[in-house]
């Protein structure tokens, strides 16, 4: 059987990968108050087995995922590209205004993300692209076919993002 026809999958379940963060959905027609979630994350790596019968080491993947999620854990996540939100830095705080809402949050508690709205879909895409960027630097990258990220916002709401490697 051709190795391109066969692939395997490894995964880290959402029970072990998680972060807590605040966000708000903001658009022209909708404004949501700042609130938080205990997000749970799943990652699946599909690819070809190496000569050692491994796609990627679980511990390496878990550490990489944990380090990446720690950058969002216990922060207020704000979009850097939302035209409906006015953001101003005032001394040590970030002042946020949209619609009738105004917040002043310590700068050390805010993370800006490259998106127009901090949705679960955007978080899954950002995390998927970050993981691809990190994994591309590794020798086993040529074995990886797909990286799939699923982020659970609640026990019933989730979004997934899949990124295929470029062979």
Image (cartoon, helix red, strand yellow):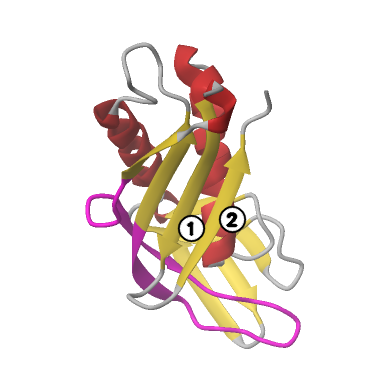
Question: Residue 81 bears which disc, if any?
Answer: none
Position in image of residue 56 (x %, y %): 37, 25
Q: Tell me, yes or no, if residue 94 can be seen here.
A: no
Is 26 positioned to the left or the right of 47 in the image? right
Q: Quadrant of residue 99?
A: bottom right
View extreme (front): residue: 1
Under circle 1, the secondary element is: strand
Q: Position of residue 146 (x, y in %)?
A: 55, 38
| Label 1: how many Cα within 10 Å (few below 14, some 14–19, many 20+) | some
Q: Is residue 6 highlighted in magenta?
A: no
Which residues lie in the magenta part?
12-40
* Cα–Cα gap, marks 1 and 2: 6 Å
Query: How packed is label 2: few (under 14 Cα within 10 Å), some, or many (20 or more)?
Result: few
Residue 89's disc number: 2
Secondary structure beneath disc 2? strand
What residue do we see at 58% from left, 26% from top?
A: 4
- Asked whether disc 1 touches disc 2, contact meaning CB atoms under 8 Å apart, the reply is yes
Residue at coordinates 65% horizontally, 78% vertically from top-left?
A: 98
Residue in the foreground of this view, choosing between 72 and 143 = 143
Residue that mark 1 sits on = 93
Residue for point 31% across, 40% down: 66
Instruction: Name which quarter of the figure residue 49 lies in.
Output: top left
């Amino acid at each position: 059987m051709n190795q391109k026809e066969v692939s395997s999958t490894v995964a880290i379940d959402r029970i072990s990968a998680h972060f807590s963060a605040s966000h708000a959905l903001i658009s022209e027609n909708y404004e949501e108050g700042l609130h938080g979630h205990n997000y749970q994350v799943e990652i699946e790596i599909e690819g070809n087995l190496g000569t050692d019968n491994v796609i990627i080491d679980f511990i390496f993947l878990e550490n990489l995922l944990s380090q990446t999620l720690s950058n969002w854990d216990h922060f207020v996540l704000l979009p850097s590209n939302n035209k409906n939100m006015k953001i101003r830095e005032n001394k040590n705080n970030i002042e946020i205004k949209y619609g009738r809402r105004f917040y002043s949050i310590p700068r050390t508690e805010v993370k800006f993300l490259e998106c127009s709205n901090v949705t679960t879909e955007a978080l899954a895409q950002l995390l998927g692209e970050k993981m691809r960027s990190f994994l591309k630097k590794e020798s086993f990258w040529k074995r990886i076919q797909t990286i799939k990220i699923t982020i659970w916002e609640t026990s019933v709401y989730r979004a997934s993002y899949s990124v295929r490697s470029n062979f």
